[in-house]
Amino acid sequence: MFCSGLFLFGCKQNAMPPSETLTPDMQVVPVLPDPPLPYSQWNFPDAWLDDPALGLFGGGGDIEITDAGATLGRVLFHDTRLSADHSVSCGTCHQPSHAFADANPASVGISGVPLTRNAPGLFNLRYQRRLFWDLRVVGLENQVLQPIGHPDEMGMDLDALPGRLAETTYYPELFEDAFGDPQVNLDRIMDALVQFLLSIRTYQSRYDAGLANGFADFTESEMLGKEVFFNGESRCNQCHSGLNFFSTQPFINGLEVDYAAAGDGGIGSLTGNADDDGRFKTVSLRNVGLTAPYMHDGRFEDLRAVVDFYSDSIQPHPFLDERFSENGIGPPGQEPYRLELTEAEREGLVAFLHTLSDTTIRTNPAFSSPF
């Protein structure tokens, strides 16, 4: 869902040939388990729930996950009926095989025009209150409908969406299961989508297994990469910290000397402030091995390119965050840091980053398309 030229999520043209593309007169019915999967019984491990830092964050407001509600959200997420021309769904770009990210650098919606940003992965959204690459929206409940209605993304007339869904053979029953009666409205569509998105949780990586067994199964290269990541000198863990490997702070990370002139000023495009030029959301490194390409514009094809950039190629910027400067502290805008990692350290860091991926997200039937 949610194409991300302007927004957090992203879509592109459906990869199916035209003969298989859904048309308004076609009824493709979702295949769902009976009883529904127990979404309401799943939760994060105690280590996550008891973490005081993670406890400060939250997305989805007061919306509670129910089995029927998340099931409805799963159907909505993967249904091309939510786009104006029935060609794309939320899941067209946010694919389970890529940890619900878009494998294309720039997402493409129904307009056919490449958007300016790459759609990042969707998981652990309980811990993301501010959304989109430029953090323009607070709360999933205020975000999920925007890309559906955006003309370059899914292009749907939101006022017409409830009527379109109510005309199907299956949505009235799904809404009744979720909300007690078959009424279809935008508030309920929003609620169900949020429930489904909040249910996409990922915490079963090789790194998590290593926390439990002292990293007994890590290779020598992975152990070296782990040391580089956490040693303080690389500063990787200053921006991507905690169990979720993320930060709620947006940073200017030195991709450009002038982001606005390069085509996307991030938060600076909203505020007009020079010290926000190129300030973007700091995404979680969870599943980073599955979510290529990287950065807000998908400029880096693989993790080695990302590691090489942070080691050697951070650009000067008048408001470069101090974490990327030689000093590491003090005012922004100092000379860029040159870490100059060895070849073994680069290879090790890439190897370690791959241990953060929870590959179960790719095959979990609770998140896959029911169509």
Image: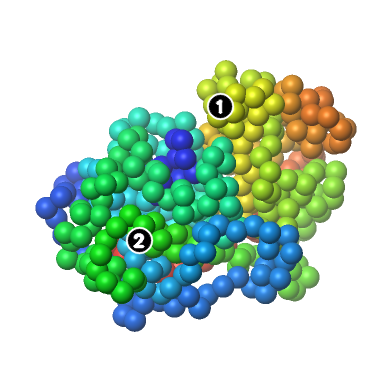
- Tell me, yes or no, if residue 104 can be seen here: no
In the displayed structure, 106 sits above or below 78; it is above
Give percent across and percent down for residue 147: 39, 43
Residue at numbered disc 2: 188
The x, y position of residue 222, in whole percent, is 73, 56
Viewer-proximal residue, 238 or 151? 151
Look at the image and tell me in which quarter the C terminus lies.
bottom left
Q: Position of residue 366 (x, y in %)?
A: 42, 69
Answer left or right for 91 relative to 282: left
- Res 110 → quadrant: top left
Q: Is residue 231 above or below residue 13?
A: below
> What's the residue at 52%, 75% (across, down)?
42
Asked if disc 2 and disc 1 are in contact, CB closer than 8 Å, the reply is no
In this rendered view, identify the residue nearer to me: 228 or 283. Answer: 283
Label 2 packing within 10 angstroms: few (<14), some (14-19), many (20+): some
Which residue is farthest bottom? 35
Q: Are there few (<14), some (14-19), or many (20+) residues within 10 Å of tag 1? A: some
Q: Nearer the viewer, mark 2 or mark 1?
A: 2
Q: Which residue is mark 1?
A: 269
Secondary element at tag 2: helix
For image coordinates 28% across by 43% down, the residue present is: 156
At 58% from the left edge and 22% from the top edge, which residue is drawn? Answer: 260
Which amino acid lies under the numbered mark 1 shown in the image of this protein?
Ser
Q: CA distance from mark 2 to mark 1?
A: 32 Å
Q: Is residue 200 above or below residue 267?
A: below
Rendered residue at 66%/40% (across/down): 250
In the figure, is residue 297 to the left or right of 323?
A: left
For marks 2 and 1 on the same chain, the one whose residue lies earlier in the sequence? 2
Judging depth in this view, the residue of 261 and 58 nearest the camera is 58
